[in-house]
Amino acid sequence: MELLVRLQERQQQDADLFLHPLLLTHHQVTLAGYKSLIDLPQTMVLLQQQVQNAVAAKRPLFALGSGIGECISCADERTVTEAMSEGHLIVISESSDVCMKIIPVPRTLTRAIEAPTTENVVRDSISAFVEDLDTNVGMIKKHVLSDQLRIRSYCFGKVQHRRAVLLHMEGQADPSLLDSIIRRLESNLDKEVSDLGKLSSVLGFPKSTLVTRFNTTELPQNVASGLTKGKVVLILDRFPFALVLPSLLADMFAAENDVNYPLVFMISVRILRFIGVLSNMLMPGLYVALISVNPDALRIELAMSIAQSREGIPYPAIVETLFLLIILELLLEASIRLPKSIGATITLVGGIILGQAVVQANLVSNVLIIILSATTIASFTVVGFHNVLSVRLPKYLLLVLSAMYGILGLFIGILVVCAYLASVSSFGIPYVYRWRIKEKSNG
């Protein structure tokens, strides 16, 4: 058989491919698949049981109604290799051109369901997504007990196939939003989607953007809440998180876990997050503006105290602020990249030693260290790590404008940031839009 010859040639270049001859009910067949995806001994036991059941029911082995698998009448090398890449076992008949695709006993290649690693949960389920797509969909169904949940499956790429699933609630998702997303996905199925950057390109998002256009979460309850609010969720295979579309400004301050607390506490926490964002963006620029351009805006006692702390510093306020901001950014990046066993210790000790050293060397003032430390802490009060990056960038624009024009430049920078946020939209939905749950009509 030509197909078997082609597979034998392919086996010489791919050591993971196995071709195992076997006798099934007087049929000489060859089992083909990948060792890394299939548990062959267990699969052979299962296959023998299925064949015995087919013989007892007097059904032909390669018939459509045999119940063993899906018959492939006109199988070529590409069709067979694609099926094997998906984890199927191919049963090839050596006496005819017919082969069969069956679901084998797979190898365990996915970790167990664990607690989240990037999102802390205080009062809610602590089960987080894993890399297996079907497991993630099942976890969402456990949280969304409704027959209105609709699921669409896609497969991206021609060389590296990547499965994706689109979820939405029928009757609650915005029709224009849903149609726009489906149209973008179906028109780009031939593109490779190996990371979130390429996925953003598939969805039509610009590369040069300061705000994220989708929220990422590894908690099924956040996905369930987004679905019930009428949002759309996209899950990629081998990605342990889900993408909730669209991302709005209010998502920075409102966590789904907040509803588990009393109303007063929930509102207080969200106001605190809002204050944290404002502090992160305004405090460095306000410090430079009051020190360099508008010192007369300060009370004389405070101005003298700050001037005394900067005594002996040879650089302008903008230089020492940028210097310390870059150091803090390096510490944050190092805390992410270093191993968990030593990362926290090194960054803590390094920050303390470095902060004390720069003060004693008269490179920065004590007041600036306090301000920028509070600024860095405040940047992590927002919901979602992707939003932290969006909050950390605008403060540099405000810092430069404040150094040039003082408090006036700070207000100009605020207007520029607000205008930019107002211009951003996702599938026609403005970024500053207040999302409302779609109410069902009475008929």
Image (cartoon, rainbow, N blue to C red):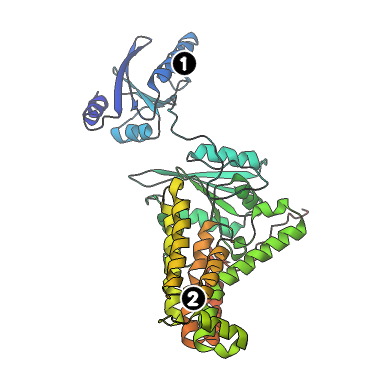
Up/down of 92 relative to 154, above or below: above
Residue 177 locus on image (x, y percent): 57, 59
**Residue corresponding to mark 2:** 365
Pick whichever of labels 2 and 1 is earlier in the sequence: 1
Residue for point 54% across, 40% down? 136
Farthest residue, direction bottom? 296
- Quadrant assignment, res 245: bottom right
Residue 315 locus on image (x, y percent): 41, 81
Residue 359 visible in the picture: yes
The amino acid type found where label 2 is placed reads Ser
Q: Secondary structure at mark 1?
A: helix
The residue mark sitting in front, 2 or 1, is 2
Point out the image quarter for the N terminus: top left
**Residue corresponding to mark 1:** 50
Q: Identify the disc placed on residue 37.
A: none
Residue for point 47% across, 52% down? 345
